[in-house]
Amino acid sequence: MSSRELHVFENPIELMEGMWPTPMLKLSLGKNVWAKLEFYNPFSHSIKDRTALFLFKEAIKRNVKSLVEATSGNTGIALSALSSIFKINFTAFIPATAPSSFKVLMKILGANVISAGNSTNELLPLVKKLSEFNGYTHLDQFHNEINVLAHYETTAKEIDKQMSSIGLKIKRIIATMGTAGHIVGIAKYFKEKYGDDLEIIGVEPAQGERIPGIKRVTEDKENKFLNMVKIDKIVEVKLKEAIEGVIDVARNDGILIGLSAGATVSAYKKIAKQDEEEVTVLIFPDDAYKYVNELGSYV
């Protein structure tokens, strides 16, 4: 076996790409429910490592010196890690309402962290001004189609190969929406290959609810990603329901998943038929450790 097959890596980028595909785990949630465990990505312990790497590679080609991004958390951690590796100045704008753990971790990695506002939508004008007047390059995960491409080329293809390798045909994939990059990249790949034989379910917070890492994308008129592909259904989830999903998986499968992952569990429970045999894949974007304070008030 090669050193890479034995998980021996000579640099952090090799580590990241060498750990793909991330694991697929069968859950006790239903008869044929599987989870894509994206917290096996090494930098942010989230699916956002993929987005960040693709965006960063494009920036490196342009020989940029300073980067700026609006982020609710995980993308900021991943970009902070990459910036520290490549010695590039990085400034992250993060909502004041985001879990404090994200801000601490980005600062440890050497990023300049500016905490303000209640959402990334409020921060985007500030980010654009900084990029215009101070020579910073705005990676713009919310509008840059490289975000979608990252998941079309990696996440989606991994899921397809993994499930095909054990002879299973996927009926539906359930994923949360923040930038909508990963759900659209996955949907684009699977709709092109399988058409409407496979159902794509999007998950967003219910009206008036806040779930870290995801938002009501269907109300964001500037999100162009959702126009790229058909999302078959949108399921609304409350924060309490997302937390119940986290607890369900923890106490039945022993896996500590994040709040957005818990939201996919809740969505599955809302739409699944009892004892159905068809294959469902849930995308688990990250794990529980950054959300201990949020979870603590419910247990």
Image: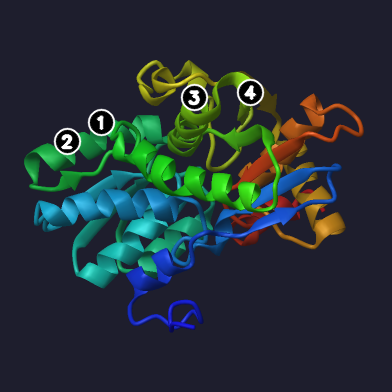
Q: Tell me which label, 2 or 3, sits earlier in the chain.
A: 2
Residue 223 in percent (x, y) is at: 38, 23
Gap in angstroms between the C-alphas marked 2 and 1: 6 Å
Instruction: Specify few, some or many for label 3: CA neighbours under 10 Å numbering under 14, 14-19, or 20 or more.
Output: many
- In this view, the mark in front (4 or 2): 4
Residue 72 sits above or below residue 179 on the image: below
Q: Position of residue 288 (x, y in %)?
A: 65, 57
Q: Amino acid at mark 3?
A: Val
Dot 1: few (<14), some (14–19), or many (≥20) neighbours within 10 Å? few
Circle 3 is placed at which residue position? 217
Left or right: 227, with 187 as reference point: left
Q: Find disc 1 in the rendering and name its residue.
A: 125
Cβ–Cβ under 8 Å for marks 2 and 3 = no
Q: Are marks 4 and 2 in contact (CB under 8 Å)?
A: no
Identify the residue at image location x=46%, y=60%: 44
User: Which comes sooner in the sequence, label 3 or label 4?
Assistant: 4
Work out whether 40 lies above or below 164: below
Which of the numbered marks, if any, corresponds to residue 197? 4
Residue 155 x %, y %: 49, 47
Q: Nearer the viewer, residue 207 or 183?
A: 183
Residue that badge 2 annotates: 129
> Along the line of sight, which residue is nearer the eye, 201 or 81?
201
SS label for mark 2 = helix
- Residue 162 visible in image: yes
